[in-house]
Amino acid sequence: MKSKIVALSNNEDFKSLLKKNKISNKYVTIFFGSLKNKDNKNLNISFSVKKKIGNAVKRNFIKRRLRNIVNDAVKKISINFGYSYLVISKPSMLNNEFKNIKETLFRELEKIR
């Protein structure tokens, strides 16, 4: 099943998610919770990379990695579509192998259910 991944758009959505549940590891911090006025057919997820991490090329590289991992996660594990997610990356994402990052994020996403 191919689901559409939709980014959060309102500033209020970001602010309310930052007040909800949080799970963290050495690669990312994931804020999650249910938002009102949200469609449960699409996955509401946004990726954020701080400017401290590097230039635009490095930041976009990290976002592409995260998007790829989430697309695989939707296919392989059950992600709660009732929640909205905000994924904030850490500098350690840049220098580690994709496989390690993917395994760690899969474990974190399975915990959220």
Image (tube, rainbow, N blue to C red):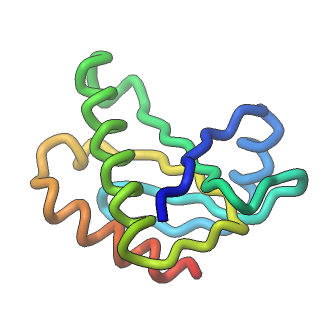
Up-down relation of residue 22 to residue 53 (above or below)? below
Q: Quadrant of the C terminus?
A: bottom right
Please tell me which residue is depicted at 52% across the width and 69% down the height of the picture.
23
Please tell me which residue is depicted at 24% across the width and 47% down the height of the picture.
93
Please tell me which residue is depicted at 36% across the width and 78% down the height of the picture.
107
Question: How many numbered circles does the render carry?
Answer: 0
- Quick check: 75 left or right of 61? right
Q: Nearer the viewer, residue 35 or 28?
A: 35
Up-down relation of residue 112 to residue 82 (above or below)? below
- Quick check: 40 left or right of 56? right
Q: Position of residue 15 (x, y in %)?
A: 76, 43
Q: Nearer the viewer, residue 93 or 75?
A: 75
Q: Quadrant of residue 59?
A: top left
Q: Nearer the viewer, residue 84 or 75?
A: 75
Q: Quadrant of residue 58?
A: top left
Please tell me which residue is depicted at 78% across the width and 55% down the height of the picture.
39
- Quick check: 97 left or right of 57? left
